[in-house]
Image (spheres, rainbow, N blue to C red):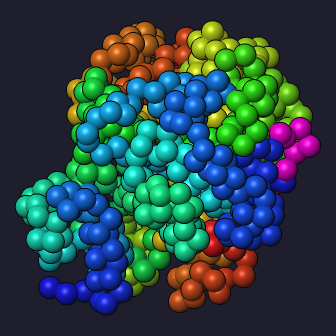
Amino acid sequence: MTFSPELEARFEKFLAKYPADRKRSAVIPMLIYGQDELGAVTDELINEIALRTGVTPLQVTEVVGFYSMLHRKPQGKYHVQICTNISCLLVGGEELWAQACHKLGIGHKETTADGRISLEEVECMGACSWAPAVQVNYDFYHDITPAQLDKLIDGLAAGKKPEEIAEVRKVSC
Amino acid sequence: MLYNQPNPLEVKVLSRRFTLLNSQSIETYLANDGYKALEKALGMTQEQIIDEVKASGLRGRGGAGFPTGMKWGFVPRQSPKPKYIMVNADESEPGTCKDRLLIEYDPHQLIEGILIAGLAVGSQQGYVYIRGEYRYLIDVMDRAIDEAYAKGILGDNVMGRGVKFHLTTHSGAGAYECGEESALLESFEGKRGNPRIRPPFPAVAGCYQSPTILNNVETFCAVPPILLNGAEYFKGLGSPKNGGTRLFCLSGHINKPGVYELPMGFNLMRMINEVGGGMRGGKKLKAVIPGGSSCPVLKADECDLAMDFDTLAAAKSMLGSGGVVVMDEDTCMVGAALRIMKFYAHESCGWCIPCREGTNWLKKLLTRFHAGMGTRSDIILIGDLAKNMLGRTFCPLGDAAALPTISIVEKFTDEFEAHLNGEPCPYENKSRLVSA
């Protein structure tokens, strides 16, 4: 199978990063960038990565099961991740998590019926000093208040892109 | 823009370029002492570089605090195998968010540190293992690496001096365990992130079973200032046997949480009150996790101490990764212990039974206890179970889960007893409200 030209170029670059007899090192980067394009780790992706890195599909599959960011089923278009680990917990992370679940009527690793938003209660994302923190896909949002979270979820649910929601601004560039 | 305001008490060595315009770019870096330490290192022998790092008193910033120069010295430089430099940018210790800034604001400082490490052991290849969640930092790092190649700083002829060094990024995919050095190497090789038995240590058999220097981002970033200003300068910044400064990540119930660069040995109470702006809402301090969630907690009356590796070890805790988590009087310590244990139960890779089973049973016990259904014998059971995990696992994750639990049960037994009356947590609905 072939992927988009961008992903093909990326895969080629990944495979060139490691010694010729160590292509297996590219498995995890290929999985995560492949997943970004396909929406999930599909059987086809696993087989293709196995083929290109010279390992068995089973060896790729066992890796997929280990890492929390890899998933076999598609997530929502916007994957909202709320940290409730210790630093976020102390300043309201659990309350934000409950608020998001209540508002959307979905729980941990669930997706709204229209496929727009999925939720995940995540472990420390490295924003402890600017807690409570939220990540939407790969973008970080710091010092989130309940009111901001409301606006963020309302906006996403109404079909807006995160950057169109004026009340919250991502910090990562 | 920095994520938090700087503080006048900071001693900016690693973070001194953070506020410069376009601090990510190689032009800014070159205009501000950039790659001058590398230039110097290119004129030094391998022994001289390692000796300089040894003399600086630099100790690993990832958590263990192992002397960096000594670690580099363990690499068998005569080995016919290729040598690798591996950067641990899998920052995921709860309470820690400093490596993010070091990469985001000054990626070239990291590249320079890596290059110097490469020279020190004769390595020609480095990899930066960045946690998958830090996707934007992979892009920042890739851009910086491209710039360094374009300027001839990386490549087959480093700065025209006939030395070869190549560097590239590598994405993780979400696993705390992969911040542990041997699990990181397994993960890097495309496998599940289970730890390896040691010895042999990575210095001898690391990446692809070859000699490998594996350090934290902040450790590599400290190397250019050491070479540039001399070991004595760096050593003089900190306390005895604890050279330099450290990026402390202050979080929790304080007025000005943030990442601040302070000298090693800076007093913890001053850190909370003068740097962190004191306790939020004028509340009383109850406890502090001094170096990420793996460290035994300190009670308020134990916090008047110097933040360096040896002082914290003497206080039966750890300096760890620099994540200082401050908890006020309204914090439920049973709840804190439970949240920390939920994390370790989630992140245990399952390789060693004491950790896999221990963390999950502790999570169950603490969940029951926090809900008011615990029994008096559970208090002893929690402590005993945690102690039985200590030292019985391949990697330190088992200890990291057990140590904070033991400290909380022992130091806050009264709070466990307060949960015994069959009612929900006495601290419910207190203090966690998000400020407007």
Left/right of residue B394 with respect to residue B88 in the rendered view: left
Would you place residue B432 above or below residue B341 in this image?
A: below
Q: Quadrant of the C terminus of chain B?
A: bottom right
Would you place residue B14 above or below residue B142 in this image?
A: above
Residue B134: % across, % down: 51, 61
Instruction: Name the residue furthest right.
Output: B8
Left/right of residue A134 with respect to residue A106 in the rendered view: right
Residue B161: % across, % down: 53, 57
Q: What residue span does the magenta drawing correspond to?
A: B6-11
Camera sees residue B301 = yes
Between B358 and B155, the one lying in front of the other is B155
Between B411 and A112, the one lying in front of the other is B411
Q: Quadrant of the N terminus of chain B?
A: bottom right
Q: Is residue A171 magenta?
A: no
Left/right of residue B15 with respect to residue B164 in the rendered view: right
Give the residue displayed 76% in from the left and 39% down from the top.
B229
Residue B334: % across, % down: 55, 27
Between A11 and B387, the one lying in front of the other is A11
Camera sees residue B326 = no
Give the residue displayed 19% in from the left and 75% down from the top.
A45
Q: Main secondary structure of the magenta part?
A: loop
Q: Quadrant of residue A6?
A: bottom left
Give the residue displayed 63% in from the left and 68% down from the top.
A172
